Amino acid sequence: MNLPQQSVQPAPFTAPPTTVLSTGLGGFVLLVLIGLNLRPFLTSVGPVLNAVQADTGMGHGMAAIMTTLPFVMMGLLALLGAGLAQRFGERRTLLCALLLLALGCGARLFADGSASLLLTAVLAGTGVATVQALMPGVCKRWFAGHIALAMGLYSAALVGGGALGALASPALSTFYSDWRPGLAVWALPALLAWGLWLWYAPRETETTGIRVSVRGFFGNRRAWLLALYFGLANSGYASLVAWLPSFYVDEGMAPQTAGSLLAWMALFQAAAALLMPLTVRGTLDRRCSLYIVMLLQVLGFAGFALVPQVAPWLWVALAGFGLGGCFSLCLIVSLDHLPGARAAGALAAFVQGIGFLITAVGPWLVGALRDGGGDFGDAWWLHGAIALCMLLLSVRFNPAAYARCMGRLGA
């Protein structure tokens, strides 16, 4: 007797068992301090880049590689970070990562050429990449029920640290008449974060939860869409960090003033990274906020390309607010796709891993255009077009489809 055919539906979307850690106010303080350490090693270079190039003979292409390389490391290590944490323990892995960041920054005090500067970028980038791979999962586990606030604070601290780097490093370099101390000083807050993590981080983070492999997401189309979106939507940040001061110096602006534009951008990034997640609390549908931040990016890059000398602070503010809000919302949307902290953290690591590799192309492309005789205008139009495409792509992130798109991953 032939039995009637029945369609097979995907298994219900269920969360793996997860231990929620209550870390209180101290957990938020530690989260913010770690975030503050993740960008100064990048943003401190742009305001003094002309001095670095004059002192070391570094060309535009090599300067772009020095900024691009950490993003490459962020991508590669994000894919490996979860595995390192599962093998050696999340607490020990993050302690080692913070030490690498401190070492990479501190070694810049003795840098005397392009090769040594690239080595410091590799060391610091490795530390930052490992931290970034693990922190979204830590946030979801430590602050369950407050993920939007936690990710907003983390992202705001991350880009706020970028503002500190852009402001403090050129001032210190001017004070010492040498660019090296302004770049090396960021080893100190990294060591402080290392000490607080050693003292405060719950030891349960080493064994809590089930093991989830990042490799499982390579065959999932939604994971690739999230990674592509993250990488392209944030590519403008990498290019601006590398080239915004140089762009306005070429436009006739004083180097110190041009460097302060990068700090101004980072301040608006920090505000958006904190405020935009708060606008989506209580709902899983983040699309309206994504539309807003991508539109602001389009307007900012259009201003750079068309009328850079007219209200440059406005264009920087628009681009910065759009980029800051985009970064935190991208991470939140990734975490929304899976309910379990381990699985969601692994997905966020995959998204950042592939995404940062895509992001890394931006500064290199701008440097290649300049070495090839082009100008910044073409690069800004390209980033504006990318932002417009990402705005249109945002419609795909309907939370009603998350369970179907992820299938059995994380179940």
Image (spheres, rainbow, N blue to C red):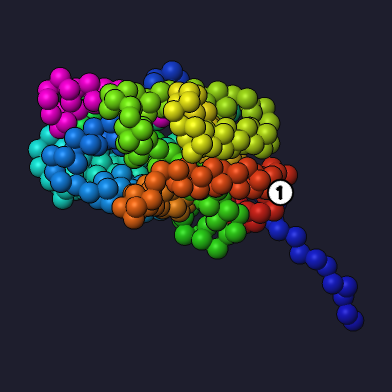
Q: Position of residue 239 (x, y in %)?
A: 40, 42
Judged by its main secondary structure, the magenta piece is helix
Q: Among all residues in the image, which is located at the extreme bottom?
A: 1
Q: Amino acid at mark 1?
A: Ala
Query: Observer-nearest residue: 397 or 172?
Result: 172
Q: Does residue 6 appear anywhere in the picture?
A: yes
Residue 161 in the figure: left or right of residue 209: left
Tell me: residue 167, above or below residue 89.
above
The residue that disc 1 covers is 401
At x 83% / y 68%, what residue is drawn? 6
Q: Position of residue 3 (x, y in %)?
A: 87, 75
At x 16% / y 40%, what residue is drawn? 54
Q: Position of residue 350 (x, y in %)?
A: 47, 51
Tell me: residue 45, above or below residue 267.
below
Q: Does residue 66 appear anywhere in the picture?
A: no
Residue 20 in the figure: left or right of residue 240: right
Residue 186 in the figure: left or right of residue 365: left
Image quadrant assignment for residue 188: top left
> Which corner quadrant holds the N terminus?
bottom right
Tell me: residue 294, above or below residue 199.
below
Tell me: residue 151, above or below residue 232.
above
At x 21% / y 32%, what residue is drawn? 183
Q: Which residues are magenta?
A: 159-182
Query: Observer-nearest residue: 328 or 306?
Result: 306
Q: Position of residue 81 (x, y in %)?
A: 37, 49
At x 41% / y 43%, what residue is drawn? 376
Query: Observer-nearest residue: 102 or 253?
Result: 253
Whether residue 323 appears in magenta in the rendering, the answer is no
Whether residue 178 appears in magenta in the rendering, the answer is yes
